[in-house]
Image (cartoon, rainbow, N blue to C red):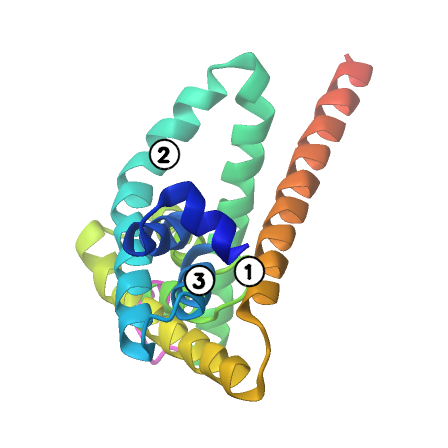
Amino acid sequence: MTQFICNLIGNNFWATIIMSFIPLIELKGGITFARSVNYSFLEAFLIAYLGSTIVFVLVFFLLRPILNLLKKIKWFNGFALKVENYFSSKANDTLSDRQGKSKGKLSEKALKQLGVFIFVAIPLPMTGVWTGTAVAVFLNLDFKDVILPVVLGNAVAGLIISLLAELCTVIGINLDYILYGLFALAVILLAITIIKVSKEKTEEKKEE
C-alpha cells in the first residue's frame, strides 16, 4: 500500500497531505503513511496535522452550500438529505450529552465547542475534522468559535495516533497493514452509506 501511494503521487510530503485530507482516512492515514516512509515522529505528526487541519475551513464554508445544491438535483437529493439528517442528529445528540453532563456549569456555546472538540479529538473511523466541523456547522457555531476546538482536538488526535504508530513500529507491526485496514474500512463505510441511500430511494418509489 505504501509503495503504491508513493508511486501514484511521487512525493512523500504531498502524499501525506493528501492522505490526511481524505474523509474517513484523515490524520489516522496521514500519520501512519508518513511513519511508514520513515518520516520522524515529529515530522509525521506536523505534516499530517497540517493536511487534516486545512480541511475544516473548506468543510465549514462549503458543506451547507453543497448540500443545498445537491438537494436540488433529483439523483442526489436522498443522499444530501441523509447527510443533513445525520449531522443534524449528531449535533443535537452532542448538545444534549454535554448539557446532561455539565449540569448548567457551562454556557450553550461552550457546550457546543466542547462537543466539537471531543468529536475531533477521538481518533475513530467516524470522528475527526470532517465530522467535527460538520457537527459545528449544524450546531450553528460561528467560524471563530470553531477554530480552537478543531485545532486543539486535532492535535490531541494526532498525538494519540502518533503514539500508537510508534508503538506498532516498536513491537514490529507493519504499518502497511494498518493502511490497508483504514482504506478497507473507508470503502466499507462508503458502501454502507450508498446501500442505505439506495434502499431509501427504492422504498420512496414503492410508496409513490
Report the amino acid beneath label 3: Phe
- Number of other residues with Cα within 10 Å of mark 1, as a class: few under 14, some 14 to 19, many 20 or more: many
Q: Which mark is residue 33?
A: 3
> As rendered, which of 14 and 52 lies closer to the eye?
14
Q: Quadrant of residue 150?
A: bottom left
Which of the two discs, 2 and 1, sits closer to the camera? 1
In the image, taking residue 156 as reference, residue 189 lies left or right, namely right
In the image, taking residue 200 as reference, residue 52 lies left or right, namely left
- Tag 3 and tag 1, C-beta contact below 8 Å: yes
Q: Which residue is mark 2?
A: 64
- Number of other residues with Cα within 10 Å of mark 2, as a class: few under 14, some 14 to 19, many 20 or more: some
Q: Which residue is mark 1?
A: 179
Across and down, in percent, residue 110 comes to 29, 69
- Number of other residues with Cα within 10 Å of mark 3, as a class: few under 14, some 14 to 19, many 20 or more: many
Specify start and end residues of the magenta stretch as a single range: 104-112
Upstream in the sequence, badge 2 or badge 3? Answer: 3
| Label 3 element class | helix
